[in-house]
Amino acid sequence: MVSGPRSFKFQNMWLSHSSFLNTVSKSWNEVFSGGGMKGLVLKLQKLKKDLRKWNTNVFGNIFDDVKLCEDEVSKAEQEFQNDSLEVNRENWFHKKALLLSKYRLERMFWKQKPHIKWLKEGDCSSHYFHSLVKIRRKKQMIHTIKDSDGRDCSTASEIGEAAVSFFL
C-alpha cells in the first residue's frame, strides 16, 4: 500500500526554544520569484522544509532523548552514591534537571493529541502513554475485509488491493 506525503504538524514545544522565531523569520524573509498565491505557497513550502530540518537538529527524537537521559541520571546517581563528592552531586542534579526538561517536551508533545485524556490526570509514565497509543492503533486497524468476490482479505497487501479495486 502506497502512502502519501507526511503531513506537517506544528509542535507547541517548538515555541519553548530560543531559536524558533529566528528560524521562522529567516525562512519567511527569503525572496521568492512570483507573487500572490504562488509566492505564498512557495514561502510555506520553504518554511515547512526548514522547520522539519530545524526540528530534527534541535529536538531530534524526544522519546530516545528521554530514555538516554534516564540512563544518564541513573549512572550519575550511582556515581554519587559510590563517591559523595560535590562534583558528583552537582553532575547528578544537572542530569536530573535535563531529564525534567525532556519530560516537559514529551508532555507537550502528548498534550497535542486530542484523544489522550490521561494528561489531565497528570500521569507521566512513558510506558503507559505508549501502551495506550498502541492499543488505540490496534483498535483502529483494519484486520479483514471482503473483496468484490466475497472473499476475506487479511494481509495488508490484500486489504490494500481490495480497497483500491473497490474505489476504481
Image (cartoon, rainbow, N blue to C red):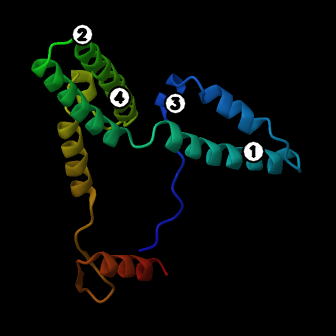
Please rate how many residues cluster around mark 3, counting C-alpha atoms within 10 Å: few if below 14, some from 14 to 19, many from 20.
some
Please identify, in this view, whether the residue under mark 4 or under mark 3 is nearer the observer: 4
Vertical position of residue 139 compared to residue 116: above or below: below
Res 109 visible:
yes
* SS at circle 2: helix
Mark 2 residue type: Glu
Does residue 92 lie above or below 36 as drawn? Answer: above
The answer for how far apart the CA atoms under marks 3 and 2 are is: 34 Å
Q: Amino acid at mark 4?
A: Lys
Task: Give residue 14's mark.
Answer: 3
147 lies left or right of 35:
left
User: Which numbered tag is attached to residue 102?
Assistant: 4
Answer with mark 2 or mark 4, whichever residue precedes in sequence.
2
**Dot 1 amino acid type:** Lys
**Residue 72 coordinates in the image, percent (x, y):** 25, 31
**Residue 43 bears which disc, if any?**
1
Image spot of residue 21 (x, y percent):
64, 26
> Which residue is denoted by mark 2 in the rendering?
86
Apparent side of residue 126 relative to residue 55 in the rendered image (left or right): left
Say which of marks 1 and 4 sits in front.
Answer: 4
Name the disc covering residue 83, or none.
none
Q: CA distance from mark 2 to mark 1?
A: 52 Å
* Residue drawn at x 89%, y 50% as measured from the top left: 33
Separation of marks 1 and 4 at Cα, in angstroms: 31 Å
Q: CA distance from mark 2 to mark 4?
A: 24 Å
Q: Residue at coordinates 25% horizontally, 78% vertically from top-left?
A: 155
Judge whether 108 appears above or below 84 on screen.
below
**Amino acid type, callout 3:** Trp
The Cα atoms of the two marked residues, 4 and 3, are separated by 13 Å
